[in-house]
Amino acid sequence: MSGTLLVTGGSGGIGAATCRLAAQRGYDVAIGFADNAAAASAVAEDVRKAGRRAVTVRADVADSDQVRAMFAQVDGELGPLNAFFNNAGILFAGTRFMDIGEAQLDRMIAINFKGAYIAAQEAARRLAKSRGGPGGAIVNMSSMLAKLGGGVENNDYGATKAAIEAMTIGMAKELASDGVRVNAVRPGLIDTEIHARAGDPGRVGRLMGSVPLGRAGFPEDVAEAVLWLLSDQAAYTTGTILDVAGGRGI
Ligand code: NAP
């Protein structure tokens, strides 16, 4: 399957790599971003260089109105979606469970869970055949920290990603008869800006020893898995959480 794909968090890291690979695989791409308009524009330029159409759409996924406006803008500027990568997310610096403050917890839930939930609903409403949609595929973004309980320092993050996994499984069951497959990727330690943004630029180097394959993942490693899950080659795969973790967490 190719067609029209929206990627939240398309301006950075895994999302940007997925937008670029998607264009090479024949998708027109809507690049969601929160703040970094210049990075989103650079990704859009690469999509156009690959011969596909691109739009950039600003939305803080913590704001439901902005999420709905983002989907409406994509409808208007790129046309009907048949694929959605629900990728945007944040991480905070490692904090002991007992010390995670309520404001941090609220922000984590607002972006990594509620924002992703509202966005998944908007996508499902557009794709579901019973609502007049074309069918299609959705990939949600989990993390190996869902399985690891957030490790020893990111429990809030791990808990939101575990919720994403439950959402994915329920969505897959409900939307199968609507022609919509729903899966998630569960990346391990991927070398992106998320670690520095969390105030911990040394995180990848520090945790590398926990990866059996002996290296951090590239954003492109995850993009390949996402594009496969979206493709017709994955036609019989739904409700799956696919580890892309170099063996971390097994
Ligand atoms: P990244 O390099 O920090 O990129 C994050 C992307 O999300 C950026 O495009 C950013 O947009 C966007 N974003 C951040 N907050 C947002 C908000 N409130 N609303 C809308 N967009 C927002 O991170 P990444 O490593 O690629 O992470 C992408 C996803 O993979 C996240 O869900 C993360 O939890 C998950 N993940 C990452 C790893 C890892 O090791 N890197 C492992 C497992 C799972 P702006 O640039 O415009 O701010």
Image (cartoon, rainbow, N blue to C red):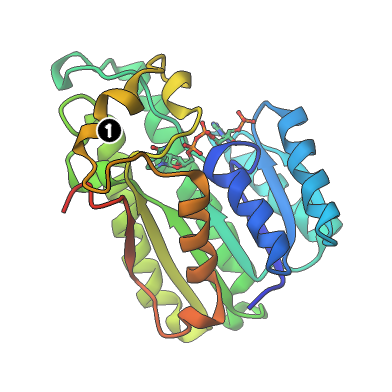
Can you name the residue that lies furthest to the front here? 214
Instruction: Indicate the amino acid at tag 1.
Output: Met
Q: Nearer the viewer, residue 94 or 65?
A: 94
Looking at the rendered structure, the secondary structure element under dot 1 is helix
The image shows residue 145, relative to residue 236, as above or below, that is above
Q: Nearer the viewer, residue 201 or 184?
A: 201
> On the picture, is 216 further left or further right than 210?
right
Where's the C terminus, which quadrant?
A: bottom left
Where's the N terminus, which quadrant?
A: bottom right
* Residue 22, image x, y percentages: 66, 61
Pointer 1 residue: 208
> On the picture, is 229 further left or further right than 67?
left
| Residue 156 visible here | yes
Q: Residue at x 33, y 23 (%)?
A: 203
Q: Residue at x 41, y 14 (%)?
A: 199
Q: Nearer the viewer, residue 190 or 162?
A: 190
